Image: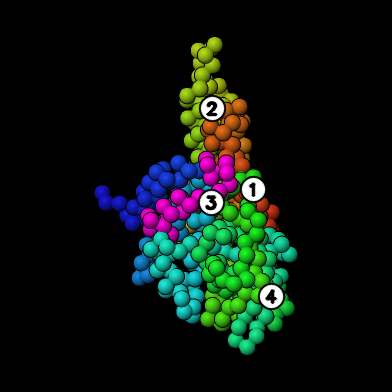
Amino acid sequence: MALSSGECWLARAREVASDVLAGHADDVDRTARWPRESTAALGQSGLLGLSIDASLGGAGEGPGTFAGVASTLAEQCASTAMIYVMHVCATQVIAAAQGFPEREAVLRRAADGKHLSTLAFSEKGSRSHFWAPVSQATLESDVYRLTADKSWVTSAGHADSYVVSTRSAGRGEPLASTLYYVPSGTPGLKVGAAFDGLGLRGNASSALHLTDVSRAAADRLTDEGEGFSRMLNTVLPWFQLGSAAVWLGVARAATSATRRHLLASRFEHLGEGLASLPNLRARLARMQVHVDVHEAFLAHVAGRMEQPAPDTMLAVLESKAAAAEMALEVTDLAMRACGGAGFSRHLHVERNFRDARAASVMAPTTDILYEFIAKSLLELPLF
């Protein structure tokens, strides 16, 4: 039976992950360096154009395939997977900007593997409330001036372009924002200190400083004041799904490593393997159940995005919160099951454990998502 297009792309992702990402992930983590080999492989494989319309050279794949690809990449290198998720989210914004003159050219370059984009939303002043920038554009004649201190910008200094948010010129409401296309190398754009985090150490989530950056009206990716709507209706669903897929991949990797460890390691003085211990078997079983349940739920969320229903936004909000908490528990169980071997680096379990710590604190944080989920259930406005 012939494979579907989605299955073909998943097979390609598995090949890239095993042939390239796996060979560089440890070094990327240890040295906190940009995974240049892995991101290049994403471009060469066509995966950077996965969600771009076929008319522009992309694959035209939807949320289900995207989630599968992101989780597959994350099994080998969560940093590369998160870089990928941010790129896909950014290209979704660019694709939706029908009035942006460079739209087709940028998307064609991305589909050809020659353009990596990312989001620059978060700011220190509004912290994890990325939807409410405190920076504000000014308008001089027909030129917008952007001055902003962006934080936690994945791929900072390595992306070819940034999707940047500011409060709209002349507006006072926190949610009145506009999104702009800012290419790398634009005068006034400066990357902050190198990223040195607990986990996701290769994704270059540094600060990005914009000082009097000039953008023409044509460089807007939304109409004035419509940035928040684009964040909520375009970015949030794709980011939530992609992020949840990353944490699923991390948990799956930890589960697989734990299984291999229990099968291979022995108490030589007792003549028994670690797999003979009921408590370790129980931990592995719990891990596998968590992974299987959340894989099924992620497929449900992707299905709701592809065929919207009244509960689509609720499922989207739940996806990252559920996956984040699952990844924390599964990687903790992995460390406990593997003991000293897990604490060392050779099983990669401790890398999975550290990477998973980012899950609950990456905006929107799990606590904020719980608030949104409850408001949705109680028919209260989210904002």
- Cα distance, mark 4 to mark 2? 55 Å
What residue lies at 52% left-to-right and 36% top-to-bottom?
A: 255
Specify few, some or many for label 3: CA neighbours under 10 Å numbering under 14, 14-19, or 20 or more: many
Q: Is residue 215 magenta?
A: no
Q: Kindly identify which residue carries mark 1.
A: 197
Kindly identify which residue carries mark 4. Answer: 136
Identify the amino acid type marked 2. Answer: Arg
Dot 1: what SS?
Answer: loop
Q: Residue at x 62, y 37 (%)?
A: 332
Closer to the camera in the image, 296 or 238 = 238
User: Is residue 90 visible in the rendered structure shown here?
Assistant: no
User: Residue visible at 26% across and 49% down?
Assistant: 1
Of tags 3 and 4, the one toward the viewer is 3
Say the numbered circle drawn on residue 34: 3
Residue 108 to residue 43: above or below:
below
The label on residue 281 is 2
Which segment did they paint magenta?
26-51
The answer for how far apart the CA atoms under marks 3 and 1 are is 13 Å
Q: Which callout, 3 or 4, points at the residue further toward the start of the chain?
A: 3
